[in-house]
Each structure stands twice: as structure tokens, then as C-alpha cells.
Image (cartoon, helix red, strand yellow):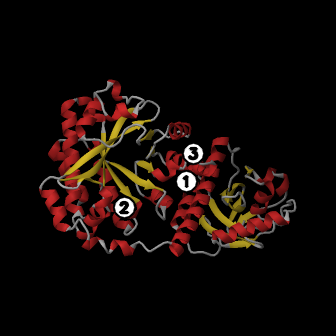
Amino acid sequence: MPHIETPEPISTPVIERQQETARRSALASAAILDTAPEPAFDAITRLAAEYFRADTVLLGFADDSRVWIKSYWGEAVGELPRAGSIFERVLAEGGPVVVPNIANDPALAGSRLRLRRLEVASFASVPVRSPAGEILGNLTIFGVEPRRKMVLDELRMLESLAEMVANQLELRRLRQALGSHAPRPCLPDRKISSAWPRRPDLRRALDQRQFVLHYQPEIELTTRKIVGVEALIRWVHPDRGVVSPIDFIPAAEECGMILPIGDWGLAEACSQIQKWCDEDLRNRSLRVCVNLSARQFAREGLADHVEALLRQFGVFSRQLGLEMTESSLVTDTPTAMEVLGSLRRLGVSLLMDDFGTGYGSLHHLHSFPFDVLKVDRSFVARITDGEQPLQIVRTIIDLARALGMNVVAEGIETHEQYALLQQLGCRYGQGYLFARPMPAEDVSKLLRLPGRVLPHSPAAANLPN
């Protein structure tokens, strides 16, 4: 590992040349060496440091002669020769290397490991692998004091962090590939201004109350009990019928109508919370989640506006959840922190929506005060496709748990997805398997079911008696 000085090289078996060639090829495909800092990787080392109370954490990738540090927490390091490094030992073992006390380790007998000014007494290192399994680098935590032996759950957590590194590498590779070969998305967007709907259409729809909210239940997976609902906007057009939000929200964003439409949605959701509580006081435990657009989130005084609505409708702050995507946070991080802090002090729930689809997912997960993480439906859809997609979801759930966050899996459509998510320890979910988005009056019927427990038949859930 870079900047570790050892009087004697660590003895390791000879690595097969063919394996090393495949490893170097996978490393070249990752294009990770000598690249600029990236928040997602910095978030991983910081998470590892805080979770394990480590003195230093290093994330490194190795070529033929060196281990280059992509990210660190604690002692600043750059690179050192690969020979005799901890990476070589991880490579030779083909898996984790845990040394609770260097003084008692036969391979390091008489050695003193140093990270610049820091003398190391213990370390644990796990491999970072390519999708095909080649070891590209390693994630290592260091301590200045001997540690107790690492228990299995701790080792799994460190491996999960390394797996998240691998997932970020793959997402990074896909983004680069799409950036090189996919059509630029700005071209079709420019057509919006000349296509339907235009600003007058949206203003007319708002004035004539053509927008409605449908609600999709969120359930506790083990009991199928309804714990909340997500509010989803629909446009009931007199000529075109029900219009999906994907057909009008981009136009609303472009022409500036997203703010009044968003304000209507917030007020309508708060009004509906009040109605459900009037129907049954037990519904006070229900949380209604509303999606905020990037422009709504960036607006000055958002927390004051939310507080005024809560007071107007007599709604408890815990009954309202606000969902934001990563893209609404990244343009101005200091402002985002201030707004989220104000909302958190107000007591509303904060949910990160579509987690995993943005550039700096881990950075935002760690930095911003979210209560709930919503696993994007694209990950849930692939969860049954093999070990790699399954591991991605497992890692997200483990990280959220380590940060004290609840997890909601979106887009559950099959019993197999449902069973796997329960096995992974995911507590909450929503999807067509349980119920589609429905009008408020249909939700009211579901809330009158014994214990608010959904039946096993989706048809029964969508058409309650």
C-alpha cells in the first residue's frame, strides 16, 4: 500500500502471468489510474473511517509497479511501490487480509508499518474487483492501536463498501460509454417549447383543476401493512384523457410552470392528509410523500412554505415526506445543505429518490441528512438477473442501515423480487405487485382493511370493496 515502509518485503506466492494480464486489462478498462478526485469514492473512505473508527482509510488501485491511491481519509497518501505492499498480499490471498495486531503476524514479524507520520499497529484490507472478478485494488482501514479480532458482520460491511466501489466503477464506465456514443439529450429537449403542452395549456389545466393526485401505497414487506403512500400527479385532460407526468413535467420545468404546479401538489397532499385523519385518527401514523422538483427545492423559503401548509391544514410534520432526486441537489451543495437542514428541523421526513442513478450517489447519501433511501426501480428490476445486481442492492441496504436510514425498494413487480428483498433485510417497498397508483378514495378503502394489511392479490388491492 502506498507510503507503507517495510524493512522486509511481505512474502507472497508468484502470481500467474495469465491472471495478471487479465487483471491489467480490466484495470485499463476501468480507466481509474491517475484520475481526478471524485466525491463518490471519497464518501466511501469516510464511511469506512466512521463505521470502523479507523485512523486512516485508503482506497488504492495497482498497476505493474505501484499502488495508486484514488481516495484516502486521514493520512494523505499518493502512491508507493507495489512490491511488498498490502495489495500484493490481498492479491495472493485472493480475498480479505485482516491483521488485528501486526506484532503477532508471522508475515510481518519484526516489521514496522508506517503511513508517513503514522505508525500502524493493525489493518484490514479487502479486494475491489472487476465485474469478472479480477482484483483491481483494495480498500484498507488502519489503526494506530491493535484491534480486537474483526467479527464476520464487520468484515462483510467492509466487503460491502469495497463492492460499492466496484459498483461505482461500473457506473462510471457506463456513463463514459454513454457520453461517447449516446445521442445528446439536449436536442429533443429543445423541441418542447414548440410541442404540446405549452405554458397556456398548463396554466389552463391548473386553473381548471385538471390535475389530480393518485397515491401508491408503501408497505412493510414482512407484514404487508400500509405505512405510507407516495403522491403522484396526473393530468385528466378533457380531450386527451389521463396524461402521464412524463408527458408534461419536462414542459412545465422548461416554461416555469413547475413551481405553481408543485405548490398545488404540496397543498393538495396536505389537504388529503387532513381528510384521512378526519376519517380515522389511526391514519395519523400514515406518511404521505411528495416529490419535489429541482426548481422547487432551490426556491428561497421552501421550509417556511412547507411549515405554513402544515399549519394551514393542521398536519403533523411527521406525516409529510419530501422526496428529492440527486440531480436536484448537485448544482449548489451549500444551498442544498441549508435547505435540507431547515426541513429536517421542521420535522418532515426527507427521502432520496432514485438512489444509485446519479453521479455522486454515495457522496450525497453520506453528506445530506436524509431519513429514507429509495432504491431505484432499475436495480430492483434486475435483482433476479444474477449475483452482481443482487449484490448492488444488498450493499445499498447495508450502507443505509449503517447510516441509520430506512430503505424503500421501488418498482416491486414479482414475488421473486419481493422474496429476495425480504431476505436482504429491506424493510419497506412499493410496486405493482401490491398496488398501482390510485385515487384517494380507493386508498381510503384500503386504509379501512383490518390492520391496514394489503391482501395478497394485487387485483384485490387495487379494487377494494
Which type of secondary structure does the marked residue at label 2 adopt?
helix
Question: Alpha carbon of mark 3 to alpha carbon of mark 1: how far?
Answer: 32 Å
Residue at image position (85%, 52%) is: 106
Q: Amino acid at mark 1?
A: Glu
180 vs 225, nearest the viewer:
180
Q: Which quadrant holds residue 420?
A: top right
Q: Which residue is mark 3?
A: 384
Question: Alpha carbon of mark 3 to alpha carbon of mark 2: how far?
Answer: 36 Å
Query: Which badge, 3 or 1, comes first in the chain's sequence?
Result: 1
Q: Is residue 425 left or right of residue 316?
A: right
Where residue 320 appears, as percent x and y from the top left, is 28, 45
How would you rate the neighbour count of disc 2 (Cα within 10 Å): few for under 14, some for 14-19, many for 20 or more?
some
Q: Which residue is mark 2?
A: 337
1 vs 134, nearest the viewer:
134
Query: Which badge, 1 or 2, comes first in the chain's sequence?
Result: 1
Q: Which residue is mark 1?
A: 50
Residue at image position (57%, 45%) is: 384
Front label number (3 vs 1) = 3
